[in-house]
Amino acid sequence: MHLRRRLSLLALAFVAAAVACDTGPVDWGDPIVINEVSGPARLVVDSSGHASFVADPARTVNAPPSVGLCTTSLRTIPSSVRLFSAWWNVRRDSSSVLLIASSADSGKSWGRAVAVDTTDVSSDGCNRPPPSVATVGDDLFVAYSMIAPEGKGVFFAHSMGPMVHAPVAVIYGDRLVQTAIAAEGDDVAVAYEDPNGARQQVAVAFSTVQGHIFAWRATASRSVDAATAPAVALAGRVLAVSWAARRASDSTATRVVRVGHIR
């Protein structure tokens, strides 16, 4: 698993270097202020480039029966035929396992929990960013930040039925960060707070092969912003990335979105 992560990172670095010699992977528009909605919401974008937040009704379901489940990390999302949950499950030594489970009856009961990533070596307990989830058909895509044996990073995993593909590294860095994920067809976009550097930025990594390799990365936020809390959406070759923006003179954060066309 570690070898696969390292190989994926090397492939990403190679492609990113090639992109850097070109004009960039995304034709970005200017960031604009976007209205949020009350309660749980998700970012959506259409093929014309119009982005908005829409209400994502909170699902009143029973949590999967799992000793050690961090309730603040539990994320639930519907697929075409099932309901999925993903969460951090804390071990006795305060490291954690990333688990998923599915329900065929809208969360009244849950199937057996399946481990997505067991390699966390931190002692953070439940004090860690929650995973982010997306579905295509009946496939589940998960992005998350954790401390792996080889270092801190943002990782991605993909389940197809009972099979979970080995996690792939999106980026390594100095700190744990918030993530967001969107998927459409074979395309996967993972947005994340940049785990490196002193400036808070939001970046996005993109895959055209269901996350097996991430072909490129790009910074989405502006250099003048302290950018946090990413959200991401896809519609064909249209990519939208949103973040909470704060400048030195701001007392509160402003939610903005930037839409681009993938080359």
Image (cartoon, rainbow, N blue to C red):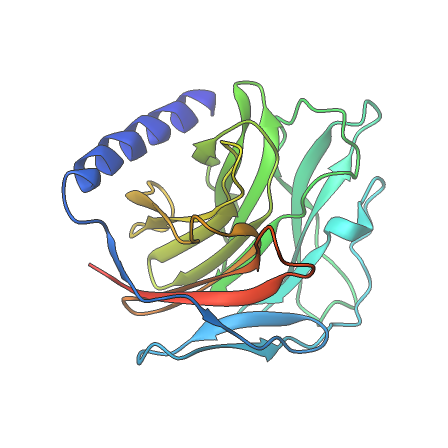
In this view of the protein, can residue 107 be seen by the observer?
yes
- Write the residue at 31% across / 67% down: 29
Residue, x 63% and y 72% (percent of image)? 41
Q: Position of residue 70 (x, y in %)?
A: 80, 45
**Residue 260 to residue 20: above or below:** below
Q: Position of residue 44 (x, y in %)?
A: 47, 73
207 left or right of 61 in image? left
Number of residue marks: 0
Q: Position of residue 250 (x, y in %)?
A: 63, 58
Establish if 23 lies above or below 245.
Answer: above
Residue at left 39%, top 23%? 6
Identify which residue is drawn at 46% across, 40% down: 165
Provide residue 177's location: percent of width, then percent of height.
60, 41
Tell me if 106 is positioned left or right of 172 in this view. Answer: right
Q: Is residue 80 visible?
A: no
Position of the C terminus by quadrant? bottom left
Observer-nearest residue: 224 or 212?
A: 224
